[in-house]
Image (cartoon, grey):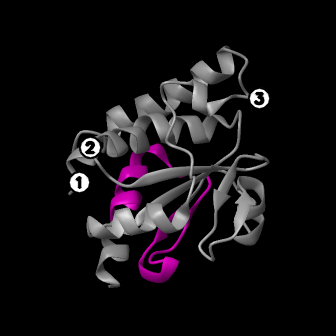
Amino acid sequence: MNPALRTMTSPVSARRDWCVGVLSLMAAGMVGAPVSWAATPDALPPSRSLPQELAAALAKDHPLIVMVSLAGCPYCQAARRSYLLPMWREGVPLVQVDMRSQTGTVDLNGQRVTHDQLVQQWRISIAPTLLFLGPQGREAAERMEGAYLPDFYGSYLEARIQKARSTW
């Protein structure tokens, strides 16, 4: 099991972290408010070049995990804070792509696109959505779409990572 998830998958702590995250965002009035993820200390790095990010992930023998997020989404914030940021800090290759964002990136075909255009290419309409990209940029495991039960989010995430690794 990923060391970053080992401490995060306790049912009690996972549920507490998830609920506290969602409730604190709601209390702060951030639900639906525009948020600049690049300006916050609890942000994942935004995608700038998927081919480069994928190559770096595969060099570590790991799928590239892409979190598709939506500004102001409390479920995105809770998943990011409770699971994805700890993993990223441990060295797991993760990037974020923001729905409705005009931030530029390079797609897997080498074309310059905005994050929003990339989300449309991938036909994603639910936030958060996690993609697990393997060799040639193919999805190496089933997407994680939407909010999962907090007690099981870490387990589902770890299973997807293992599935993705086993496909190449």
Amino acid marked by disc 1: Asn
- C-alpha gap between disc 2 and disc 3: 28 Å
Under circle 1, the secondary element is loop
Residue visible at 55% across and 24% down in the picture: 40
Q: What residue is shown with label 3?
A: 34
Under circle 2, the secondary element is loop
Identify the image quadrant of the N terminus. Answer: bottom left
| Residue 115 lies within the magenta run | no
Q: What residue is shown with label 1?
A: 2
Identify the image quadrant of the C terminus. Answer: bottom left
Amino acid marked by disc 2: Glu
> In this image, 154 relative to 32: left or right?
left
Callout in the foreground (3, 1): 3
> In this image, 134 relative to 119: left or right?
left
Q: What residue is shown with label 2?
A: 90
- C-alpha gap between disc 2 and disc 1: 9 Å
- C-alpha gap between disc 3 and disc 1: 32 Å
Residue visible at 77% across and 29% down in the picture: 34
